[in-house]
Amino acid sequence: MFVDEVEIKLGSGAGGDGCMSFRREKYVPRGGPDGGDGGDGGSVVFQVDTNLATLVDYRHQTHITAGRGVHGKGKDMTGARGRDAIVRVPPGTIVRSEGGEIVADLVDPDSTLVLLKGGRGGRGNARFATSRQQAPRRADPGEPGTQMTVRLELSLLADVGLVGFPNAGKSTLLSRLSAARPKIANYPFTTMSPNLGIVQWAEYESFVLADLPGLIEGAHTGKGLGTRFLRHIERTRTLLFTLECVSDDPRAEFETLREELGGFDPGLLTKPYAIAYTKADLLSQDPATDPLEDLAVPRFLVSAVSGRGLKEMVAYLGTEVKQIRETEIADQESTSSL
């Protein structure tokens, strides 16, 4: 089950109380204070796990609380630290506060973030002993933990995102190019959640292809599957618009798709893209003209059934993704050297 939005309540652990105790041993008069400190409370730690691809683990586990620190004891015994609450999330998870502000954007694999720190343990009375105050009767309570409600949103990390209207052949294309097996049927909105597939385009080269649920006019305002899945396009390196070659007006469909992307996030219009005319096997003969020939972008006439044009399209997409990756690495190295 693909779950990309959850709301959970988090709580760090309270610190243990310090102990007020005095040494009591035979033949040791006036033993003095020996109360130990309380243990620190456990923290709430987010950890990126590359083995996860969804937030389904937190669909029903809506309360996550770290352990409380153990109280201090006599004989200078410090209480044990509380257990940390580890929240494992897939790469691309955005953590938002109740007000909608971004608290963290967890993209890097195996990265960790301490979101809520546990309460500090209280000091035992042994800590307050001085030459003038040799029998202190004071011990601090542990600090309370902190509470926070957050919303987790998953934004898929993919190299190429398929963008198109329902039944434009995106799922069929994904199943032909990769080992992914999305649901395919002859009715709209068969894809109810994003699907990922790895496409091998050279002997040692591959890229991740994302089949996103079909868009309709007004999607950026919430119509259809709406903005729930539009955000998955934000992290893709390049886009592939899929238009049926037998459509009555491919240009109008393309412009509508671009308007929906721009309405959701104008930055999506700056992403590189290509166009795939799908279902070429339905043509009795090749079209005489290209309805989008005035656009200076690659266009491919393809068929996921017969395999027509797929090799050339995959080679272009692989080369494009490789160049973008190299540019990103160069930018990161130049930034880190400053």
Image (cartoon, rainbow, N blue to C red):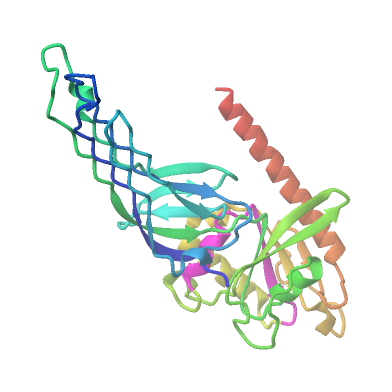
Residue sitting farthest toward the top: 131
The location of residue 219, given as percent across then percent down, is 49, 73
The location of residue 275, given as percent across then percent down, is 71, 65
Quadrant in which residue 246 is drawn: bottom right
Quadrant in which residue 268 is drawn: bottom right
Quadrant in which residue 72 is drawn: top left
Side of 31 where 327 appears, left or right: right
Q: Nearer the viewer, residue 102 or 246?
A: 102
Q: Nearer the viewer, residue 263 or 87?
A: 87
Write down the region rendered in magenta: 226-246
Q: Nearer the viewer, residue 15 or 183?
A: 15
| Residue at (62% x, 79% y) in the render | 166
- On the question of residue 200 being in view, the answer is yes
Side of 239 where 198 appears, left or right: right
User: Where is the C terminus found, in terms of image quarters?
Assistant: top right
Q: Report if residue 231 lies within the magenta region.
A: yes
The location of residue 182, given as percent across then percent down, is 69, 75
Q: Where 26 sits versus 209, above or below?
A: above
Q: Report if residue 227 lies within the magenta region.
A: yes
Residue sitting farthest toward the front: 27
| Residue at (78% x, 49% y) in the render | 319
The location of residue 243, given as percent across then percent down, is 69, 74
Q: Where 149 sits versus 330, above or below?
A: below
User: Where is the N terminus found, in terms of image quarters?
Assistant: bottom right
Q: Where 279 sits versus 99, above or below?
A: below
- On the question of residue 287 being in view, the answer is no
| Residue at (84% x, 78% y) in the render | 305
| Residue at (38% x, 50% y) in the render | 66
Q: Nearer the viewer, residue 19 or 108?
A: 19
